[in-house]
Image: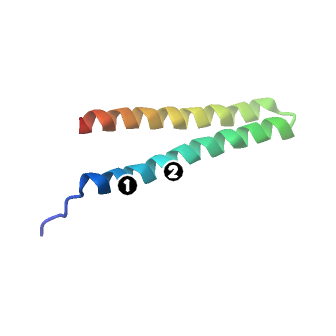
Amino acid sequence: MMKKRLTQSEEFEIMKMVMDKFLWLGTVIMGYGLFKMFTESDIANGIYFLVTGVIVLVLFVIIMVKEYEMVK
């Protein structure tokens, strides 16, 4: 049984959906960290969430750069 290959436009649409989820995840985590910093007296807990959001976004950038280099 042969596997169906995706066209470039289909592959790009799928990659856009995945990128969107990573960006929203990182943004929501960072937003939750800001919320925790403003509503609670424990600022360190909010900073942990902010740093976690930054790490998610940096991992996203690393994955995208590697993917771009593979396609090129």
Say whether disc 2 or disc 1 marks the residue closer to the N-terminus. Answer: 1
Q: How many marks?
A: 2
Quadrant of image for the C terminus: top left
Q: Residues within 10 Å of mark 2 (few under 14, many from 20)?
A: few
Res 53 quadrant in image: top right
Q: Amino acid at mark 1?
A: Ile
User: Disc 2 versus disc 1: distance between alpha carbons?
Assistant: 11 Å
At 51% from the left and 50% from the top, the residue drawn is 21
Q: Amino acid at mark 2?
A: Lys
Residue 18 place in picture, x, y as percent = 44, 51
Judged left or right of residue 31, residue 59 is left
Tag 1 secondary structure: helix
Residue that carries the numbered disc 1 in the rendered image = 14
Residue 12 place in picture, x, y as percent = 34, 50
Judged left or right of residue 57, residue 63 is left
Label disc, if present, on residue 21 of the rendered structure: 2
45 in relation to 29, above or below: above
